[in-house]
Amino acid sequence: MSLTRRQFLAASVATAGAALAAELPSAASATEKKPIRSTTSARNVLLIVADDQGYDLSCCNGKVKTPALDQLSREGSLFTDAYAAVSSCSSSRATLYTGLYSHTNGMYGLSHDVHNFSLLDNVKTLPWMLKQAGYATAIVGKLHVKPEALLAYDAWLLPEQAGNRNVAAMGHAAGEWMRAQGSKPFFLTVGYSDPHRAGDASQFGNTRDWPEVRRERYAPSDVAIPSHLPDLPEVRADLAQYYEAVSRLDSGVGILLRELEASGHAEDTLVIYLSDNGRPFPGAKDNLYYEGIHLPLIVRAPGRKGDVRCRAMVSWIDITPTILDWAGAHPPADYHYLPLPGRSLLPILETPDPAGWDRIFATHSFHEINQYYPIRSLRTRQYSYFHNLEPALSVPIASDVALSPSWKAINSTSGARLGKRSLDAFHHRPEEELYDLANDPDEVNNLAGDVAHAAALAGLRQQLAAWRTATHDPWMAGVTDPFGPAH
């Protein structure tokens, strides 16, 4: 079955009335001092953002070594079904900082260089809202969202520098700033550059030793081949380099958390760890398929039970509401984009299987300025559904992925596939894709034209259209602004 875009939109909008309802080296630093014990009742926030880390943790049966993150998960809640709302760096970070989908907040693609996407002028950000509530705010490392004026951090410690993987320097800068805040509540964002590709995309910053980091090297024979990649020697070698960068990132998290302890604020700080998008390999980063958006999320909240594995389907759209809930802060009452579409995770931190957390939405428009391929998606426990808004276009490849040894090997190997998906199927997609996840977790057998799944398709189509309307998707023909005039 194939619908024209006009027919598709007409059918979707007509039915869219439904409501959406570590064992790490010691640092010769403040972390070796006896921790100060906070005497305040501040509710601080430490948001830790990895760059291009897929769902790769040793505590989740992964072969990469992540002892610091494993320990954090034992002390908090590990969300096993957590998803980015978009699989592109700037767009994903903008979702974290605004609580809005990228097609709503205006961060349609990358912010840097000629790409130059930015938030809409009337969007309020998380650091701005927390500053109104009396918080000190700072960011260490990668921001990657424009305009900086809307982010409104009080301090930018060690701004991102190309090639900088000095996770120890980042951790110590964070610790010095946290100790300087005294009794004032703080919101600190630490944005790592690991494990993003570096330089010519053939390595991951692994060309040298870094201070205070015990270097972990991996043999290509020891890596696990994820389901979206072929088992080729070049892919294995590339994954081994990626693993090393993930382990360096983990060392940095260990240093950072020891600095938090030394500051005396470990017992009054909400710690959130996550990644912005999937691993930087074809079929993951810059894709809304499972490997592109299924990512690590660990939340450690003081006073809450630890070692919880929560199977709720949650989204990065829920991060801003969670932090605001912890801080007792709110967007302005007359804010243009109320209500925010996400929900606080605090009520479910200690619940392995909370009810009512069974679907997530995802969106993608651009990555780089010349890489346009708009997709809207809905994932439930049973199905994943994709509406490709411009199916006549070929799906582009992020430039760092296109330059990678993996992609070059795949393209030069006769008959090579992206896991079970052919290269042609990856590049050329129909307007609708529907996958039965119980029987097809790799999302290769499209059931959108299967009569037996027509009712499921219609229901998912309806839910997606209602969500697009509620989130003011400008790609949806005939949508009017549900928020009223801009403030």
Image (cartoon, rainbow, N blue to C red):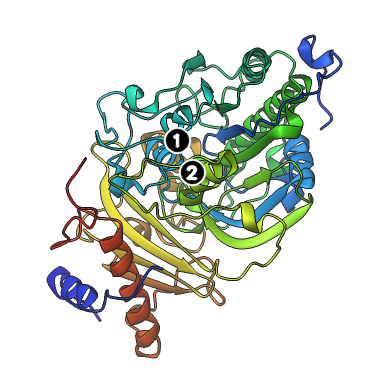
Q: What amino acid is found at the position of numbered circle 1 in the picture? A: Leu
- Badge 2 crowding class, 10 Å Cα cut-off, few under 14, some 14 to 19, many 20 or more, is many
Q: Quadrant of residue 26?
A: top right
**Mark 1 near mark 2, Cβ–Cβ under 8 Å?**
yes
Tell me which residue sits at (65%, 37%) in the image.
271
Say which quadrant the C terminus sits in. top left
Q: Out of 312 and 235, give the one closest to the viewer.
A: 312
Q: What amino acid is found at the position of numbered circle 2 in the picture? A: Thr
Position in image of residue 451 (x %, y %) = 34, 89
Mark 1 to mark 2 CA distance (whole Å) = 7 Å
Count of labels in the image:
2
Residue labelled with disc 1: 126
The answer to whether 266 is drawn above or below residue 169 in the figure is below
Tell me which residue sits at (35%, 36%) in the image.
124
- Badge 1 crowding class, 10 Å Cα cut-off, few under 14, some 14 to 19, many 20 or more, is many
Residue labelled with disc 2: 320
Tell me which residue sits at (19%, 55%) in the image.
481
Position in image of residue 329 (x %, y %) = 50, 39
Position in image of residue 310 (x %, y %) = 68, 59
Tell me which residue sits at (36%, 87%) in the image.
455
Q: Examine the rendering and report whether any part of residue 396 can be seen.
A: no
Q: Left of 387 or right of it: where is 221?
A: right
